[in-house]
Image (cartoon, helix red, strand yellow):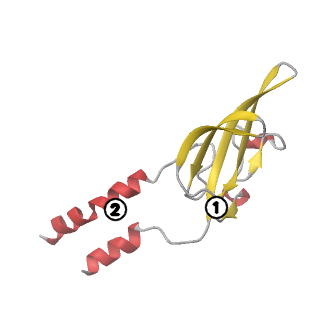
Amino acid sequence: MLLEEVLLLIFIPSCEAFVRCFSCSTTYDTRCGDAFAFTTTDASQCQGTCVKRRGTRDINGVRTVEITRGCISQTTDDCYDGNFNGISVYICTCNSDYCNDAQGYRSSTGLTLLLAALPLIYRIMGR
């Protein structure tokens, strides 16, 4: 029983009420673009979900990539097409610290699979 409790403490994420997200826009700061140049000290606490939106805007015949990163109240990991600030954008939301960085969308699928395998691991180690 002790082994199971230790494994659960190691692998279950803490139940914090916030996640740390980057918040910026290429409209105001070029470091927010595809060549992302922020550090974890630039992130802020979010009581929701991190979001990254990427789209293009036509300004005087010139296509300009616009990227925004921030926090929204949605609480699911997902990627989908949508609209933001008058343009079509690709939106990704995520629920882990710093997940809206240049690496894009990251899922917690690996952790989920590992947690699902814990009973099997426990049985094997218990034999």
Q: Nearer the viewer, residue 38 or 123?
A: 123
Q: CA distance from mark 2 to mark 1?
A: 23 Å
Check disc 2: other Cα within 10 Å, few if <14, some if 14-19, many if 20+. some
Residue 9 percent location from the top left of the image? 39, 74
Label 1 amino acid?
Arg
| Quadrant in which the N terminus is drawn | bottom left
The spot of residue 78 in percent (x, y) is 53, 46
Judging depth in this view, the residue of 119 and 72 nearest the camera is 72
Task: Give me the residue at 79% from left, 39% from top.
Answer: 30
Q: Considering only vertical position in the picture, is 67 above or below 70?
A: above
Which residue is rendered at x = 56% and y = 71% of the image?
Answer: 16
Residue at the extreme right of the image, as rendered: 60
Kindly identify the amino acid type of the residue bearing the numbered disc 2: Leu
Which quarter of the picture shows residue 56?
top right
Residue 125, relative to residue 99: is it above or below?
below
Residue 10 visible? The answer is yes
Image position of 126 (left or right of 60): left
Residue corresponding to mark 2: 115
Which residue was labeled with disc 1? 20
